[in-house]
């Protein structure tokens, strides 16, 4: 039966398939099989460059045809491997047998036993998974994430001089500038981006229990540790020097942790914009034919920010589980990491959906300057900090208490109330004039 997205169990492969389809090239079953084939082929080529009696067996044509096995990998190839797996009941061994079939076509029948030579399945899995994660982050996640940062930076610059009432504890506080508040998110995300880009992607590669037992017994004089480090580095990864049968997963956990922190910041961003929209600081572009509520015709809901918040929460739940589970394995290995690893694309997919939703939502906001202006105008009490600080500078007795008595009354503090207060102060006319120049609209700091 042909699969339809309406039949998908997960919304990633159903409702949101169009938004995350690029990740299928990295995290689908077919993609995993292709990555395994790629690592096996590259490993065999590396052996042919290292072991004396294998040198010279690969002509340029043969080498190109070997590379073509994974570069031109097809769905039919993946199906053939799954067919072999039904017999072997072992997914990596099925890849080995598939490649050996290809070797017969290449005239490499005598060298077939150097496919998967000395390896355990985790040498292939623990290079394939970090490789697919690294490439998915580089080619799919980072462009979308960078696009969001650029979008926020554009707004931070555009709204650089837009005064806005700040709110701490939900209450009116010393005014700020809208652009600066957006810049806070730009800064936070850029700092996490630096951490993300600095993290090494590491792999396990060392045989059945991480000691090169099989390699060393076959070729005891060969420097297998140096060979493995060079080979893994050629994949764009770093080899974990000491492991059991499986990866330590510590760096992969660190990656999931930094992605979690990024998502926490993005949840903060989504909630702030949701609040700004509810406060009427932003209107939203209206699309013809779009419905905000099935019952209330007037509604224009901030659905993109809500969608982002929900998907970021799901992503972080899975990231957290992966980061806490993967580094733990009984003795030299148990199989729990195997099934868990197959889900590494799930949180990235939810993160990608969220990034797209945030960019869509940000693209629809329309600044309502009048609402920001009126909010400041209705909160003259916030200049109390400025006035009492100037009075402190001038040695005025108990300035904080004087402003507290004026403003902490639950009554509206108007421009006139502030004016009258200043005029009643026993200070020079120059100081009064300095204080009169302060308003909620210009008391925005640096």
Image: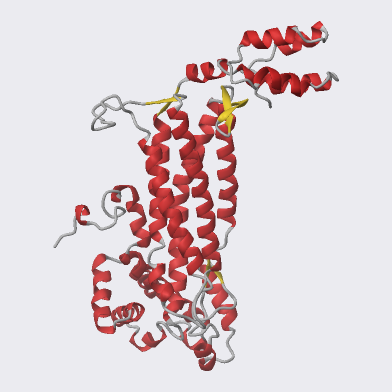
Q: Is residue 214 left or right of residue 405?
A: left
Q: Residue furthest left?
A: 1
- Work out which quarter of the rendered image holds the N terminus and state it: bottom left
How was this image coloured?
secondary structure
Quadrant showing the C terminus: top right
Coordinates of residue 122 in the picture (x, y in percent) = 44, 77
Judged left or right of residue 256, residue 400 is right
Q: Work out whether 411 lies above or below 217.
A: above
Q: Position of residue 70 (x, y in %)?
A: 35, 68
Q: Tell which of 332 and 202 is nearer to you.
A: 332
Q: Is residue 383 visible?
A: yes
Q: Nearer the viewer, residue 273 or 96?
A: 273
Residue at 51%, 30% (x, y): give it: 155
Q: Residue furthest right?
A: 395
Q: Residue 412 location in percent, x, y?
A: 58, 16
| Residue 325: x %, y % from top left | 48, 68
For the point 53% across and 82% down, the residue is 210
Taking the spot 45% from the left edge, 83% from the top edge, the residue there is 119
The mark tally for this picture is 0
* Looking at the image, residue 89 lies above or below residue 419: below
From this view, report whether residue 63 is shown above or below residue 57: above
Confirm whether residue 72 shows in the render.
no
Seen from the viewer's position, the closer of residues 44 and 107 is 44
């Amino acid at each position: 039966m042909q699969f339809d997205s309406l039949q998908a169990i997960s919304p990633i492969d159903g409702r949101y398939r169009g938004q995350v389809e690029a990740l299928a090239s990295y995290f689908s079953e077919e993609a995993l099989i292709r990555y395994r084939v790629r690592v096996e082929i590259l490993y065999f080529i590396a052996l042919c460059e290292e072991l004396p009696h294998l040198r010279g067996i690969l002509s340029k044509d043969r080498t190109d045809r070997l590379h073509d096995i994974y570069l031109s990998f097809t769905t039919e190839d993946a199906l053939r491997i799954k067919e072999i797996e039904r017999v072997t009941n072992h997914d990596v061994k099925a890849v080995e047998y598939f490649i050996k079939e290809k070797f017969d076509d290449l005239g490499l029948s005598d060298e077939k036993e150097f496919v998967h030579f000395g390896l355990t399945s985790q040498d292939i899995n623990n290079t394939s998974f970090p490789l697919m994660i690294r490439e998915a982050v580089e080619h799919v996640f980072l462009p979308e994430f960078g696009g969001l940062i650029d979008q926020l930076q554009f707004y931070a610059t555009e709204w650089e001089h837009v005064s806005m009432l700040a709110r701490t504890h939900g209450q009116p506080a010393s005014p700020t500038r809208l652009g600066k508040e957006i810049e806070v998110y730009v800064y936070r995300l850029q700092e996490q981006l630096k951490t993300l880009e600095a993290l090494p992607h590491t792999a396990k590669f060392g045989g059945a229990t991480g000691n090169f037992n099989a390699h060393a017994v076959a070729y005891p004089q060969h420097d297998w540790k140096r060979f493995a480090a060079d080979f893994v580095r050629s994949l764009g990864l770093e080899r974990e020097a000491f492991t059991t049968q499986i990866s330590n997963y510590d760096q992969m956990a660190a990656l999931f942790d930094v992605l979690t922190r990024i998502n926490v910041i993005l949840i903060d961003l989504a909630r702030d914009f949701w609040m700004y929209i509810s406060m009427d600081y932003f209107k939203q572009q209206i699309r013809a034919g779009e419905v905000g509520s099935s019952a209330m015709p007037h509604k224009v809901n901030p659905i993109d920010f809500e969608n982002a918040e929900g998907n970021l929460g799901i992503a972080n739940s899975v990231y957290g589980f992966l980061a806490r589970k993967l580094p733990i394995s009984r003795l030299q290995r148990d199989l729990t990491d195997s099934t868990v690893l197959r889900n590494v694309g799930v949180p990235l997919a939810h993160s990608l959906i969220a990034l797209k939703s945030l960019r869509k939502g940000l693209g629809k906001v329309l600044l309502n300057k009048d609402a920001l202006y009126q909010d400041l105008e209705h909160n003259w009490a916030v200049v109390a900090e400025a006035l009492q600080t100037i009075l402190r500078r001038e040695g005025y007795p108990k300035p904080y208490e004087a402003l507290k008595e004026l403003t902490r009354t639950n009554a509206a503090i108007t421009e006139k109330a502030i004016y009258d207060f200043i005029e009643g102060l026993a200070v020079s006319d120059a100081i009064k004039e300095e204080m009169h120049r302060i308003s909620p609209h210009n008391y925005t700091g640096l």
